Amino acid sequence: MIKKEVFEKEIAMCKKLSKENNGGCKWGKCKDCGVPLLLWKLYKGELIEDEDEIRKIKRDILGV
């Protein structure tokens, strides 16, 4: 598990890279990325597999 501060720092980095690179970072596009979901799993201990829930979480934490 990771602490809330680490989760927020990493998500902030995702948001910054997305903004700087028009919806993606150097590795791909936010809509296809699994990093926010991995961070969510490490922070909350929840594995999200439902596509609607995945979209909701990405929208809530990244705005995508």
Image (cartoon, rainbow, N blue to C red):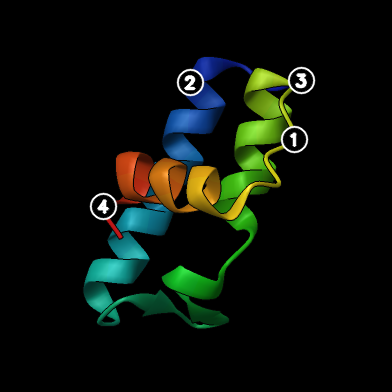
Q: Earlier in the sequence, mark 4 or mark 1?
A: 1
Dot label at residue 1: 3
Question: Amino acid under label 1?
Answer: Leu
Q: CA distance from mark 4 to mark 3?
A: 24 Å
Question: Amino acid under label 4?
Answer: Gly
Cβ–Cβ under 8 Å for marks 3 and 2: no
The residue wearing badge 2 is 5
Q: Secondary structure at mark 2?
A: helix
Q: Earlier in the sequence, mark 1 or mark 2?
A: 2
Depth-wise, is mark 1 or mark 3 nearer the camera?
A: 1
The residue wearing badge 4 is 63
Left or right of residue 33: residue 57: left
For label 4, count other residues whose C-alpha is less than 10 Å away and answer few (under 14), some (14-19) or many (20+): few
Q: CA distance from mark 4 to mark 1?
A: 20 Å
Q: Earlier in the sequence, mark 4 or mark 3?
A: 3
Cβ–Cβ under 8 Å for marks 4 and 1: no
Q: CA distance from mark 3 to mark 2?
A: 12 Å
The residue wearing badge 1 is 47
- Compared to residue 37, the image places residue 44 above or below, namely above
